[in-house]
């Protein structure tokens, strides 16, 4: 249990931004977003001093404001930042907590025709908006991105695809090695979707050929739409329903298809659970383990790259993190990879290591 801090807390301000990039997004999510920004103790809006700026990306079902919410017996991220500053482990920085929540429960901070252009939203809109609003070091060498889980995925993928924007990145338990972290969840998802078939199941003889005759591989036969409608009406989804929504969100992210029902395709047969290779190939094209070889030039320009994962991660992401580190080593890309004895949950304390690493990388 941590005591209440006695050091300067910095200042938390709330900004509102209306997006053009998200206008007309397929989920009908709000284009005007309010989000918090942490300013360090002693921040001055006037003068010549320019501050490094960090963007914190949350995991699935999270949003920027969640990082600044009060916690019992623990620190929120602004309190953690204030302590690290007081302990001189980091110098003065500005930290932005974007709101990228969607009706699918979140996103992976990449562009998707089925969800929205969230990479463009961050890079083309929020970064210029922040640079205009505060005394930032308005160049890639003064800018870092960090996150956990889906946010960690966003951080590592942005370091690969948008190295001209970010000087350093930290990935905590970011989604990697999709064959482990996602594929194992699909049987339960398919079972949950069966509850929403347009023609409810009945006990008795089951004719697979007749059932499959109604299906087009990867295409929703109506059960996904009925599930989504059910979720949007329900005040509190169950844990199984949240997991199902998450995997559908990933499908919308990695295999969007504007002409298909719901705007995306599915990687498994809805009746037999068999993998559809062509669809899964689209997913694997977004796996960080597979992205390294095509982005080595960008990655080699990064001033700092930090990755960590608990070796008891319940989504098995430690296996993917190890493979990701191996691929980075093989490509000659400097990075720091750490493991620790914990799961996927409640690991914000790991930012005690990553944030000083990022700060040093930009100096």
Image (spheres, rainbow, N blue to C red):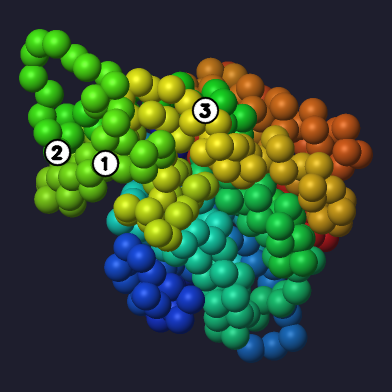
Q: Mark 3 = which residue? A: 181
The residue lying at 40 percent from left, 59 percent from top is 259
Pair 2/3: label in front:
2
- The answer to whether marks 1 and 2 mark residues whose Cβ atoms lie closer than 8 Å is yes
Asked if 192 appears above or below 146 in the picture, the reply is: above
* Labels 2 & 3 near each other (Cβ < 8 A): no
Disc nearer the start of the sequence (1/2): 2
Q: Position of residue 93 (x, y in %)?
A: 64, 64
Please tell me which residue is depicted at 63% across the width and 22% down the height of the picture: 319
In this orientation, which residue lies closer to the viewer: 306 or 8? 306
Mark 2 and mark 3: span between their CA atoms?
30 Å
**Residue 20 in sight here:** yes
Depth check, front residue: 356 or 182: 182
Task: Name above or below for residue 31 compared with residue 259.
Answer: below
| On-image quarter of the C terminus | bottom right
- Residue 172 visible in this rendered orientation of the protein: no
Give the residue at x 40% y 77%: 23
Residue picked out by circle 2: 198
Residue 328 x, y percent position in the rendering: 81, 37
**C-alpha separation, residue under disc 3 versus residue under disc 1:** 26 Å
Horizontal side of 212 relative to 84 (left or right) equals left
Neighbourhood count class around disc 1 (C-alpha, 10 Å): few under 14, some 14–19, many 20 upward: some
The residue labelled by disc 1 is 221
In the displayed structure image, the side of residue 294 where residue 72 appears, left or right? left
- Element carrying mark 2: loop
């Amino acid at each position: 249990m941590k005591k209440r801090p006695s050091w300067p807390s910095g200042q938390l301000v709330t900004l509102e931004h209306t997006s053009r990039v998200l206008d007309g997004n397929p989920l009908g999510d709000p284009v005007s977003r309010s989000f918090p920004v942490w300013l360090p103790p002693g921040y001055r809006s006037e003068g010549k001093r320019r501050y490094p700026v960090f963007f914190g990306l949350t995991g699935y079902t999270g949003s920027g404001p969640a990082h600044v919410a009060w916690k019992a017996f623990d620190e929120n991220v602004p309190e953690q930042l204030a302590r690290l500053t007081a302990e001189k482990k980091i110098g003065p920085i500005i930290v932005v907590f974007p709101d990228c929540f969607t009706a699918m429960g979140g996103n992976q901070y990449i562009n998707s025709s089925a969800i929205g252009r969230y990479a463009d939203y961050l890079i083309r809109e929020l970064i210029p908006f922040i640079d205009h609003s505060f005394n930032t070091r308005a160049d890639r060498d003064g800018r870092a991105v960090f996150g956990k889980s889906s946010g960690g995925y966003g951080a590592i993928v942005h370091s690969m695809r948008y190295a001209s924007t970010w000087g350093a990145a930290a990935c905590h338990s970011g989604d990697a090695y999709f064959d482990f972290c996602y594929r194992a969840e699909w049987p339960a998802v398919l079972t949950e979707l069966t509850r929403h078939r347009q023609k409810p199941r009945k006990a008795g003889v089951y004719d697979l050929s007749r059932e499959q005759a109604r299906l087009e591989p990867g295409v929703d036969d109506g059960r996904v739409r009925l599930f989504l409608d059910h979720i949007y009406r329900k005040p509190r989804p169950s844990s199984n329903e949240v997991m199902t929504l998450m995997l559908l969100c990933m499908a919308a992210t990695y295999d969007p298809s504007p002409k298909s029902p719901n705007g995306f395709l599915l990687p498994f047969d809805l009746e037999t659970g068999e993998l559809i290779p062509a669809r899964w190939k689209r997913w694997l094209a977004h796996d960080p383990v597979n992205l390294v070889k095509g982005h080595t030039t960008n990655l080699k320009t990064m001033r700092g790259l930090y990755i960590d994962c608990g070796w008891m991660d319940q989504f098995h992401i430690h296996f993917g993190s190890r493979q990701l580190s191996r691929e980075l080593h093989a490509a000659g890309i400097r990075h720091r990879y750490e493991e620790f004895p914990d799961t996927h949950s409640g690991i914000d304390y790991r930012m005690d290591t990553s944030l000083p690493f990022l700060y040093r990388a930009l100096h």
